Amino acid sequence: MDFFLFTLAAEEGGINIFPEPNELIWTIINFAILLWLMYKFLYKPLLGAIQAREDEINNNLKKAAEDRAEAERLRKEFEAQIANAQREAQEILNKAVKNATAAKEQIEADARARASELLEQATQTIEREKAKALAELRLEVANLAVAVAGKVIERNLDTEEQRRLADSFVAEVAKH
């Protein structure tokens, strides 16, 4: 509504909307001085602040990139350490399995050697006992033979009686 009243007043000749030429010149001079003052005291410091902020952002971006690169390097180093630790653990495990296998084989070899030794001792003991039993048996047979021979000589027996006596001797030997 104000604009309508202003336009109406301008048509009636009461208000001149265009300034006088000397006012126009002074307005332009004042505006130029204002622009120069703003350039001198406001624009340069503002550009400086903007440049400082831009430098700070660039520095932060560079630092972030460096930090990212450092983090990546540390991650790779950590992964390498983990891989190395896993490799060492696997080597230790393999060594333990190898040692356990060697110990098992040694124990088995010792057990086989001990069993063989015991078997050999048992075989020797059996052979000795067998030889002893055979010696005792021979001694007994010799004693019986002497006894039978003594009986035969004592009795001067006929052939049939000798045969019967020999059979009884053989039967007696078979019992022992």
Image (cartoon, rainbow, N blue to C red):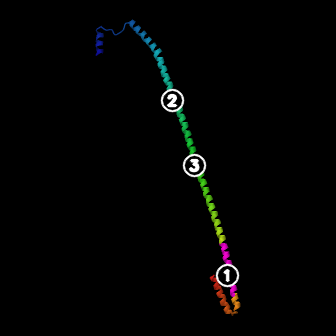
**Residue drawn where x is 66% and y is 77% of the image:** 133
Nearer to us of marks 2 and 1 is: 1
- Crowding near the residue tagged with mark 2, few <14, some 14–19, many ≥20 C-alpha atoms within 10 Å: few
Q: Which of 160 and 138 is in front in this view?
A: 138
Q: In the image, is residue 91 above or below residue 146?
A: above
Counting from the top left corner in percent of width and height, residue 122 is at 64, 69
Q: Which of 16 and 51 is in front in this view?
A: 51
**Residue drawn where x is 61% and y is 54% of the image:** 99
Kind of residue at disc 1? Glu
Distance between the alpha carbons at the discs numbered 3 and 1: 73 Å
Mark 1, residue position: 140
Mark 2, residue position: 61
Q: In the image, is residue 135 above or below residue 97?
A: below
Nearer to us of marks 2 and 3 is: 3
Give the main secondary structure of the magenta stretch.
Answer: helix
Kind of residue at disc 3? Gln
Q: In the image, is residue 45 above or below residue 119?
A: above
> Which SS class for mark 3?
helix
> Which SS class for mark 2?
helix
In the rendered structure, which segment of residues is drawn in magenta?
126-148
In the image, is 78 to the left or to the right of 147? Answer: left
Kind of residue at disc 2? Leu
Residue most extreme to the bottom: 158
Q: In the image, is residue 140 above or below residue 7?
A: below
Check the picture and name the quadrant holding the C terminus.
bottom right
Counting from the top left corner in percent of width and height, residue 23 is at 39, 7
Mark 3, residue position: 90
In the image, is 101 to the left or to the right of 148? Answer: left
